[in-house]
Image (cartoon, helix red, strand yellow):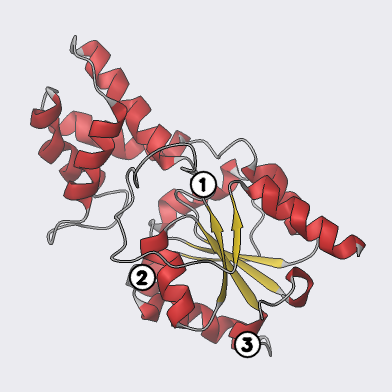
Amino acid sequence: MTKKLSDFKYLTFDVVGTLIDFEGGITNCLAEIAAEAGAIVDGETALRLYRAARYSPDAGRFPDDLVRVYEVIAPELGLPAERRHGERLRDSARSWKGFPDSAEALARLAKRYRLIAMTNAQRWAFEYFSRELGDPFYKGFTVDDTSTEKPDPAFFEKVFAFVESEGNSRDDILHVAQSQYHDIGISRKLGLTNCWIQRRHAQKGYGGTIEPESFTEPDYHFTSMAGLADAVERSQAV
């Protein structure tokens, strides 16, 4: 049986895509570059090209890798393939917005749980993301801290070790994420209870996130962070 929401001590979070609207951040920046060049960019096409470029064998750490990604996708989008625009796309991460419900939901959840960020982004970018979200995290793990990216189990093992250092275990964790590929599938394999935040519930496809080989049915499923926070508060009222 799925554990009750009141049974957990920690909520671990994917950040980019679950809490931070990276798709909007990328497509908005590309649209600005396109407008200056007298071009028009289709957002879903841009995300499809981004996804293919981002997950190539020569990919670097995110979001520094956006410089390389831009130079790969720009010709296909009819945009000027100049490094300065790639650097602009990378630097746009400093101003990416949280989803409208993210900060408020995290503030509500922080009253009940210890919130841990688990992001494939670099530390410099995470600091901007955390500030945008109201700095709600008890602890944060980035690609710079783990030297690997989800869905590598080694990323999760770093978090498990931290939780164990506090006298707790993975059974005390609810893992919250939007990516089936990076988070939901592997969290199931590692024995975690998980919660899928289906951010693209009103859109087709996987957008800028790689498509999983198979779909993993989550333990909990909401289409927003507000939905999770509401469910937690209802569970406390019972």
- Residue at image location 39% in from the left, 38% down from the top: 23
- Residue at image location 53% in from the left, 83% down from the top: 160
Asked if disc 1 and disc 2 are in contact, CB closer than 8 Å, the reply is no
Q: What residue type is labelled 3?
A: Ser
232, above or below 203, in the image: below
Q: What element carries label 3?
A: loop
Q: Which amino acid does label 1 sit on?
A: Phe
**Tag 3 residue:** 169
Q: What element carries label 2?
A: loop
**Tag 1 residue:** 129
For marks 2 and 3, give the CA distance. Answer: 20 Å
Q: In the figure, is residue 86 to the left or right of 171?
A: left
Q: What residue type is labelled 2?
A: Pro
Q: Which mark is residue 151?
A: 2
Residue 213, given in percent of the width and then of the height, sits at: 28, 65
Sequence order check, earlier mark of 3 and 1:
1
